[in-house]
Amino acid sequence: MSSKVINLNELKPILIDKTKTDEGILHFLSTFKIHHLLKPFNTAKTKGISVSTLLYSLIIFRLRGHSIHNVQNHHMNFLPKIDDNSFYRLMNNSFMNWRKLLMAFSKQFNVKTKEKGVSTKSTTCFVLDDTDIEKTGKTIEFIGRIFNHVTKLHPLGFKMLLLAYWDGKSLIPVDFSKHREKGKKGNFGMKKKGTKIQI
């Protein structure tokens, strides 16, 4: 997944202007009360930089189009300087409930749109879709082969199942889960040798 957001046309006028970007980010953090929203997740990490600070930073990096790798060269004055390993440790933290966090954001978005009186007469519905997460390492835990419906090939990877809610105007991500595909032989498309070397 690319960390760039230059293809989002609605954000282009803001992202090309650094001042507007910073103002927009601070407005977003304030409007959505992100600090309050992230507070319950601080229990996933007891030492060092808080989870809320790290997640604040990740959101801002994403909106600015920076990756964790190059963010050290694009330091923002309103954020503390953080070692990139802190972000990787958070993302690998098994106590971090990412699905719960996404649901919290979705609920907050819904609350804010209702407060502003945003409503449409369009049909509302849930949208369910899956997408491929292709990988190259055979030692990755639970890695297997998946079927790509477009190319008809069986690359290594996982299937990401995604749930979103269409409120008539916006498509709001609600939940996600990662899956393996057993395959016809029930071995996830892997030989015994490949299964043994998985971490």
Image (cartoon, rainbow, N blue to C red):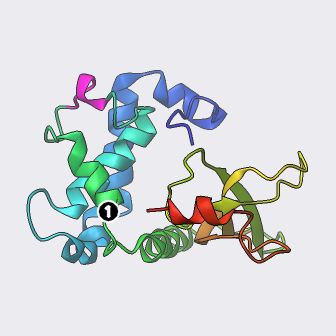
Q: Nearer the viewer, residue 155 or 75?
A: 155
**72 inside magenta stretch:** yes
Q: Where's residue 196, x and y in %?
A: 53, 65
Q: Is residue 129 above or below residue 54?
A: below
Q: Residue at x 48, y 21 (%)?
A: 16
Q: Is residue 198 above or below residue 83?
A: below
Residue 158, can we see it? no
**101 inside magenta stretch:** no
Q: Amino acid at mark 1?
A: Ile
Horizontal relation, residue 178 to residue 75: left or right: right
Q: Specify few, some or many for label 1: CA neighbours under 10 Å numbering under 14, 14-19, or 20 or more.
A: some
Task: Name the residue tied to disc 1.
Answer: 34
Q: Nearer the viewer, residue 107 or 155?
A: 155
Q: Residue at x 86, y 74 (%)?
A: 184
Horizontal relation, residue 51 to residue 176: left or right: left
Q: Which residues are magenta?
A: 71-76
Q: Where's residue 180, x and y in %?
A: 67, 70
* Residue 188: quadrant of the picture: bottom right
Quarter of the image with the N terminus in it: top right
Q: Where's residue 26, x and y in %?
A: 31, 45
Horizontal relation, residue 112 to residue 66: left or right: right
Label 1 residue SS: helix
